[in-house]
Amino acid sequence: MERQLRLRIVGPGVRPGRIAVRDLQRIVQPLEQAARAMSPAPPHQDQKQPLLFLSGIDEGSAVAEMTYEIDEQPTLLDHPQDPIQQLIHILTREADELPKNAAAALARMASKLPDGIEYVELSCGTLDATPRITRPEREPRIIHREHLSRSGRLLEVNFAKNTAKLQLQRDQRKKQVKLRFPDHLAYDMQQATRQLVVVEGEATFSQDDKIKTIDVERVSMPFDDRHALWAPKRFQWPQPEDRIDNIDYQEFLRTSRDRYDDEGGK
């Protein structure tokens, strides 16, 4: 037996009678998963086969019409196998009674509703109930900006994306902060790579008052730190008191010649 499910998609970003296919998929796919989780599928039913079929988009706040097939034979206690109606009944009474998989699918759909969509309203057949799945309220992101300067070692300069990383020196955990720089500072960033620098610019802070990014306006090198890029030389010139004087060069040449002859040289 074929029945109809209607989805009314409401929000300031919804165009009357139109909705993007990818947005509709983000709504219908978890809804279908929730319906399947309402009751165990019969042995002959293939879980890979689609449950819902799109039959049209009406005018209004993008009303999507779906059709689905149910088994007319009653199950235990004479309850028909209609997962959509069961889903709507539980959503109308108490959403906490939903099976775990169904609740997880609907929560995923609510959290990923596309921008501009406030809620999705369900209606089915002759049912009076029209439950809504609403986007959860998001806490406002409190982000502020401040002009500052920070010192550290310049690492991982990406000239294709105009980004870099600054390893803060005074942070014992060696925290790295993302830098963004304009094109005219590319040469300065190249010259300062892997050196101790001071960057000045507009910093963006996260909710926990930590620096997320710095838009670099100026970069400078207080002193030459290139000696830190290579290991110290092991060779040392001998001191004057360690030098050997009064060498008999003739004796050295004769000794070297005799040793060469003894080894079979010509």
Image (tube, rainbow, N blue to C red):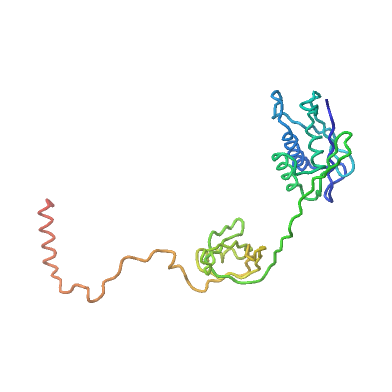
> Viewed as shown, does residue 235 lie left or right of 25?
left
Task: Measuring from the top left, give residue 10's x and y in whole percent.
Answer: 84, 47
Task: Say which quarter of the image contains residue 64.
Answer: top right
**Residue located at (13% from left, 65% from top):** 252
Task: Say above or below: 168 vs 90.
Answer: below
Task: Say above or below: 112 vs 165.
Answer: above
Task: Say which quarter of the image contains residue 101.
Answer: top right
Locate the N terminus and report the quarter of the image it occupies: top right
Task: Say above or below: 2 vs 175.
Answer: above
Q: Nearer the viewer, residue 237 or 78?
A: 78
Task: Measuring from the top left, give residue 250's x and y in whole percent.
Answer: 12, 67
Q: Is residue 4 visible?
A: yes
> Viewed as shown, does residue 112 lie left or right of 18?
left
**Residue located at (29% from left, 70% from top):** 237
**Residue located at (76% from left, 31% from top):** 51
Task: Say which quarter of the image contains residue 75.
Answer: top right
